[in-house]
Image (tube, helix red, strand yellow):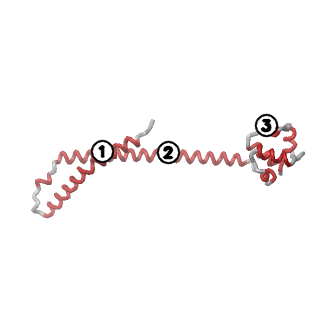
Amino acid sequence: MLNENIKAIRKSKGLSQEELAIKLNVVRQTVSKWENGLSVPDSEMLISISETLETPVSILLGETIDESAADDLKAISEKLEIINLQLAQSKASKRKLLHWALISLCAIIIANFAFLLIMQSPYLSWDYSNPETAVAGVAFHAYEWIFVRLAPIVLIGAIVGVILTRKKK
């Protein structure tokens, strides 16, 4: 079990037998004997191995380490990369949608201003003795009054939004 764990952890750290031997101040054949189960390191060497491989002694002496741990990390990193790409695409599409919505809002506000300028408040010349005409006239006047006061603020906000959501090069 110890021999398999030393070998698996050494490989997962990307070390060769020679590199591990140099770090432990032993010859490569010693590391080979440990990994093949032909000899066992003493307690002091076991502590040195654990420090060099940055692995607790209990893990070295414990259960078998799967060599697929590195493969699992690679699979997880690939999945995270895919998720990051999907999130980036989603963010870009939302920004693009918001950008075009703000452009549309600007166009609608400008069209309404043009309409109100062309019409020049025709309801002012209506005969308000008819209650239905009076209600319609008041509704048009309220719309025009609110629109003329709020639309410039909304238009400025929409223009700033269009500038902030444009595609960066």
Q: Secondary structure at mark 3?
A: helix
Q: CA distance from mark 3 to mark 1?
A: 69 Å
Query: Which residue is drawn at the image coordinates 40% and 42% (left, top)?
Result: 164
Is 78 or 27 nearer to us in this picture?
A: 27
Q: Which residue is mark 3?
A: 19
Upstream in sequence: badge 3 or badge 1: 3
Q: Which residue is mark 1?
A: 107
Q: CA distance from mark 2 to mark 3?
A: 43 Å
The residue under label 1 is which amino acid type?
A: Ala
Query: Which residue is drawn at the image coordinates 64% and 48% (left, top)?
Result: 76
Upstream in sequence: badge 2 or badge 3: 3
Residue 97 x, y percent position in the rendering:
41, 47
Could you tell me if the residues under marks 2 and 3 are in contact, i.e. CB atoms within 8 Å?
A: no
Is 97 or 30 nearer to us in this picture?
A: 30
Q: Would residue 153 be found to the left or right of residue 91 on screen? A: left
Q: Would residue 59 be found to the left or right of residue 164 on screen? A: right
> Is the residue 139 above or below the residue 85 in the image?
below
The residue under label 3 is which amino acid type?
A: Glu
Residue 99 x, y percent position in the rendering:
39, 44
Q: Which residue is mark 2?
A: 89
> Is the residue 118 above or below the residue 129 in the image?
above
Q: Which residue is outermost to the right?
A: 38
- Closer to the camera: disc 2 or disc 3? 3
Q: CA distance from mark 2 to mark 1?
A: 27 Å
How dense is the environment of label 2, judged by Cα within 10 Å: few (below 14), some, or many (20 and up)? few
